[in-house]
Amino acid sequence: MKFLELGLSPNIQKALDELSYIEPTPIQAQAIPEILKGSDVLAAAQTGTGKTGAFTLPLAQMLHTATGPKAKPNHIKALIVTPTRELAAQVYESVVGYAKHTDLKAVVAYGGVSINPQMKFLRKGCDIMIVTPGRLLDLYERNAVKFTQLETLVLDEADRMLDMGFIHDIKKIIKLLPNKRQNLLFSATFSDDIRKLSSTIVNNPVEITVSPRNTASETVEHSVIQVEKSKKSKLLTAVIKENNWQQVLVFTRTKSGANRLVKQLSERGLEAAAIHGNKSQGARNKALAGFKSGDIRVLVATDIVARGIDISELPNVVNYDLPNVPEDYVHRIGRTGRAGSSGSALSFVTIDDIEQLSAIQNLIQQIIPIVHVEGLSLSKPLPEKPLKAVKPKKPKKPKKPASKKVYNMELQGRRKARKPAGGNKPRTIGH
C-alpha cells in the first residue's frame, strides 16, 4: 500500500510528499483506513512503529475535509491525551507537519509552564488539542476548554498512563466527554488493565497488533564514545577527518542543534547541511542531492524528517545525540549496512545519556563497545548497566471461538463474516 492509495486530500498528500513519505508503516496501513471510516480502534504498537502518524494523519485528514461548523471559542474537535510533556510535544510536531498546508489549528498543553498562553489560544477554538491529563483537568476547571463539539478522543501510550498513576484522571476526563465520539486507544501491549480500561471507552473496536522492530543488521559495527557535552562537535570533526569519512549521516535531537552543528562543522572545513522540519522542501532536496553526489560530506538530520532519507550503501551513521526512545536507534542505524554492505554506527554518550544507552542496549540485546579518542573522550569511564534478561513470552491461553469480523492483511479483498455477537467485541486485523 502507498499513501496515494488512501485518497487523502491534496493538501495532506502534499505534506507527505514533502517529507518523502511514500509507504505507510504496518500500523499506519492498518489503522488509517479504519480511522477514516469512523471506527473505534484499539491498537498495540510500541514507539518506533510509526504509531503517532497512525492517528495524527487521519485526524488531520478528517478535520480538514469536514463540512460541519468550525470549533467555537474554547471548544475543541479532537483530543489527544498523552502521559508526558515530551510525548505531547512530539505528537504536536507530527500534527503540525501533516496539517501544514491546511487551516487547521492545533494546541499543545502540559504542566510545568504558564497556563495563560494555553488559555488564550483556546479562546479562539481549536481543531486538535494535545495535552497531558493533569493540565487538561486544570484547563477544564478554569472553564478554558469545553467538549460539546468533541468528535474524536485519542489516548496515546495508555499503558504508560496507567503505570504513572493517571487512571483516576483518565476516568474523570472520560466522564466529561460526550458519549457520541470516535475513540482511538494506543498502547504498547494489551494487558488485562488496558483491556479493562478500553472496555469503558471504545465501542466495537477494530483491534490491531503490530510487533516492534528491535533488531539491527549484523553487518553494522556499533560503537560508543563517551564524551563531555561541550566537546561533542570537536570530537565529531576529529572522527570524520581521521577516518577520512566522505559520507556521514548525523542525527541530532533538535532542529536548533542541527543548525548549530552544521555551522560548527562548516567553520572547521567540513561541507555540511541540515534537514529538518523548518527547512523548505527546496532546501531539503538540495541538501539531500548534494549529499548523494558527494558535494556535501555531512548531512545532519532530526528523526522527524529522517524517515524520508533513502540512500543506498550509506557507510556511516553517527548518533550525535542519542534518541529519546530506543526504537529510534534501530531506525537510525537501519540506513547503513543495507543489502549485505558493511556500515558503522557511532554514538556519542554523555553522563546524561546513561539511561538512554542502557535502554538501547536492552532493546538490541548487546553491549556496545566503547572506543577511546585521545584528548577528546572521557578519561574516566561512565557507569555501566548490565543487560536485562529477556523474559520468555508465556504461551497464550486458547480462547473460546467467538463470532468476529476478521481482516486478513494477506488477502486482496475482505471475506464476509457474521457480525460480532457482543457490542464491545473487537474486530481483529491480522499481523
Image (tube, grey):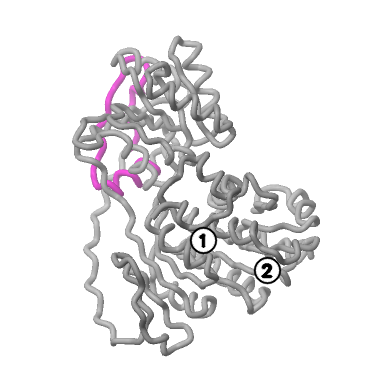
Tell me which residue sits at (40%, 57%) in the image.
Answer: 46
Q: Quadrant of residue 232?
A: top left
Q: Position of residue 21 (x, y in %)?
A: 45, 44
Which of the two labelled residues, at mark 2 and mark 1, occupies the earlier sequence position? 2
- Could you say where residue 70 lies in the image, as x and y percent from the top left? 75, 61
| Residue at image location 45% in from the left, 63% down from the top | 31
Side of 187 where 392 appears, left or right: left
Magenta part of the chain: 355-383
Magenta span includes 399: no
Q: Which residue is mark 1?
A: 156
> Which part of the image, by quadrant, shows the N terminus?
bottom left
Q: Amino acid at mark 2?
A: Leu
Left-right relation of 413 to 263 = left
> Farthest residue in the bottom direction?
421
Q: Pinpoint residue 353: horizontal percent, then vertical percent.
A: 42, 38
In the picture of the structure, the residue carrying the numbered disc 2 is 150
Q: Specify whether residue 122 is in view.
A: yes
Badge 1: residue crowd in 10 Å (few <14, some 14–19, many ≥20)? many
Question: Quick one: quadrant of the C terminus?
Answer: bottom left
Q: Check the image and report above or below for 4 versus 426.
A: above
Type of the residue with mark 1: Asp
- Determine which of the numbered discs, if any, sits on residue 89 in the image: none
**Vertically, is 290 above or below 194?**
above
Q: What residue sits 64% from the left and 79% below the top?
A: 179
